[in-house]
Image: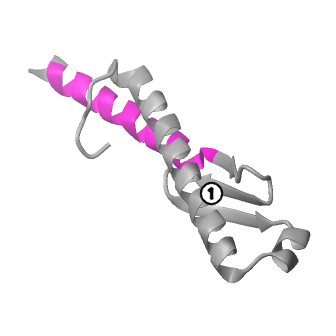
Amino acid sequence: MFDKMKQAGSLMKQMNSLKKKIDKLETLSESKDGNIQVVIQGTSNVKSIKINDEFLSQTSSKDLEKNLIKALNEAIKEAEKSSKKIMSEVTGGLNIPGL
């Protein structure tokens, strides 16, 4: 019984370490034309958005919004993919709820 508790404690330490690693993970996504760059930290925290000044002065607000949404969604998707890859290294591909 003690061994199982020790193993569970060790697993929890590994998972906390992975969560910290994932929280520090930064994912860069760029619009197809390169005019918008988005950096996501962790799996959903927007760290920065850069918009090309020339593009900004030449585009409508609708086009800007559309391109920004695409770049944000792509960045979040890539961040989640990277997070799952990190988690699978420890869990051996098991899907553990809440992680």
Amino acid type, mark 1: Ala
Residue 15 in view: yes
- How was the colour assigned to the protein in this rendering? one colour
**How far across and how far down the image is residue 55, in percent?**
84, 69
Name which quarter of the figure residue 25 lies in.
Answer: top right
**Residue 19 lies within the magenta run:** yes
Magenta-drawn stretch, dominant element (helix, strand or loop): helix
**How far across and how far down the image is residue 63, in percent?**
67, 72
Q: Quadrant of the N terminus?
A: top left
Q: Residue at x 52, y 36 (%)?
A: 82
Start and end of the magenta stretch?
4-26
Name which quarter of the figure residue 91 lies in.
Answer: top left
Horizontal side of 26 relative to 93 (left or right) equals: right
Front position in the image: 23 or 28: 28
Q: Quadrant of the C terminus?
A: top left
**Image position of 24 with respect to 6: above or below:** below
Residue that lies at the very extreme toward the left in this rendered image:
1
Horizontal side of 90 relative to 82 (left or right) equals: left
Front position in the image: 68 or 61: 61
SS under mark 1: helix
**How far across and how far down the image is residue 79, in percent?**
53, 45
Name which quarter of the figure residue 92 lies in.
Answer: top left
Q: Which residue is the site of mark 1?
A: 71
Residue 20 in view: no
Q: Residue at x 60, y 63 (%)?
A: 46
Number of numbered discs overlaid on the protein picture: 1
Front position in the image: 21 or 62: 62
